[in-house]
Every structure is written in C-alpha cells, then in structure tokens.
Amino acid sequence: MTETTSTPAATASDAGVPRRNVESFNLDHRTVAAPYVRLADRKVLPHGDVLTKYDLRFTQPNHAHLEMDVVHSVEHLFAEKSRDHSDAVVDFSPMGCQTGFYLLLSGDPAYEDVLALVERTLQDVVEADEVPAANEVQCGWGANHTLTGAQEAARGFLAARDGWSQVTA
C-alpha cells in the first residue's frame, strides 16, 4: 500500500466537478494565486521510501502561460542546475498547461529547504550563459530554446519569493 498526502487547497469537487485520480485535477485552479511553491503530493512507497512532489506555479492558471520555448529551456536549466545543489532531485517536469513545473524529490525535505533549493537553482538560471543540452544530439527539439526567456521567467519567479508559500488568494 502506498500512503499519499498533499497540501489542502480548494478542490475541484467543491466546485461540483468529479473527483479525479490525478492530484492536480482535483485542485480548483480558480482559487490559486501564482507564483507559488506547493506540496502537491507525498508518497510512501511499499518499502518505506518517500517521494515528494512540488507544484512550482509560474503563471496564473487560465490567465497566462509560459511560451513553449521558455518552458523547454527552464526545464533543461532547472533539471541540470538543481542537481548541483541536491542529490534528492529525482525529476523536474513541465506541466502540459505551460503554467509551471513539478519538482519530484526523494525523501521528505522540510518545506523551507525546498524553497531554498528552488531559489538557489533559479538564481543559477539567471546567471547561466547557455541552456544545457540544447542541441540535436542531447534534445528531441534542440532548436526550441530561449536562454533569455528562461532567465526572464526565473527573474519573475524570484521577484515573488516572499509570496511563494501563499497558494491561494
């Protein structure tokens, strides 16, 4: 049996829509106030290992989104640079809606430690001089990148640092 927990927020079922298996589909996206960092899920696996998933929401759902080349470049940069700061990083994945990313970590880090990891990594993005693996050999769409776009998105997220823990308006 796998134990699952997530951060309480207004749910989609509160809005009269059916409950879904995917945690983010049960979040009422109308009630959130991006940018934020939210514990989206915590799973205890059958042998006791813990995985934690964080929702890093860059833009307000259904009102704004990141362009695909920005999403792609932030993904490459954060996935590479975050591992310079933590061995707990399992994955960093974009949301299909292009409003943010999921950060998957092994273990059960303190929320403040996750915020520090995100802050250090995004500072690295701002200071980067290239998008790692932005080529046809290492990437499935090597031409679809923008360093300046990724840096602008990172700067915007960093500028809202004091509000990252405030998920709802």
Image (cartoon, helix red, strand yellow):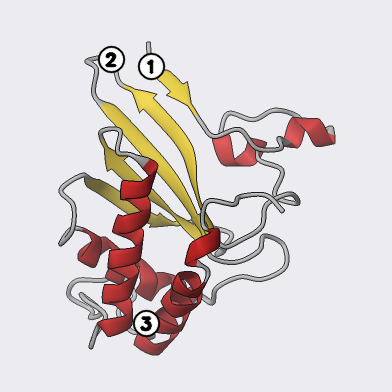
> Which tag is nearer the camera, tag 2 or tag 3?
2
The image quarter containing residue 43 is top left
Q: As displayed, is residue 59 above or below residue 13?
A: below
Q: CA distance from mark 1 to mark 2?
A: 6 Å
Asked whether 12 or 31 is in front, the reply is: 31
Category of crowding for the residue at label 2, using alpha-carbon neighbours closer than 10 angstroms: few (below 14), some (14–19), many (at least 20): few
Q: Amino acid at mark 2?
A: Pro
- Measure how far apart labels 1 and 3 are at the Cα level: 38 Å
**Residue at which label 1 appears:** 2
Element class at badge 1: loop
Whether residue 80 is situated above or below residue 51 in the rendered picture: below
Q: Is residue 90 left or right of residue 24?
A: left
Q: Amino acid at mark 3?
A: His
Label 3: state its secondary structure: loop
State the image coordinates of residue 89 (x, y, percent, origin top left): 24, 48
Q: Are marks 1 and 2 in contact (CB under 8 Å)?
A: yes
Where residue 166 appears, as percent x and y from the top left, is 59, 52
- Specify the amino acid type for callout 1: Thr
Camera sees residue 17: no
Give the class, few, some or many, for how many residues have Cα within 10 Å of label 3's Cα (few <14, many ≥20).
Answer: many
- 89 lies left or right of 74: left
For label 1, the crowd category at 10 Å Cα-Cα, with few meaning under 14, some 14 to 19 and many 20 or more, is few
Residue 76 vs residue 118, the one in the foreground: 118
Q: Compared to 22, does 48 lie above or below?
A: above
Q: Earlier in the sequence, mark 2 or mark 3?
A: 2
Give residue 145's mark.
3
Q: Is residue 88 at all visible to an observer of this figure?
A: yes
Q: Residue furthest top?
A: 1
Task: Tell me which residue sits at (79%, 31%) in the image.
Answer: 14
> What residue do we see at 54% from left, 57% from top?
36
Determine which of the numbered discs, if any, sits on residue 46 in the image: 2
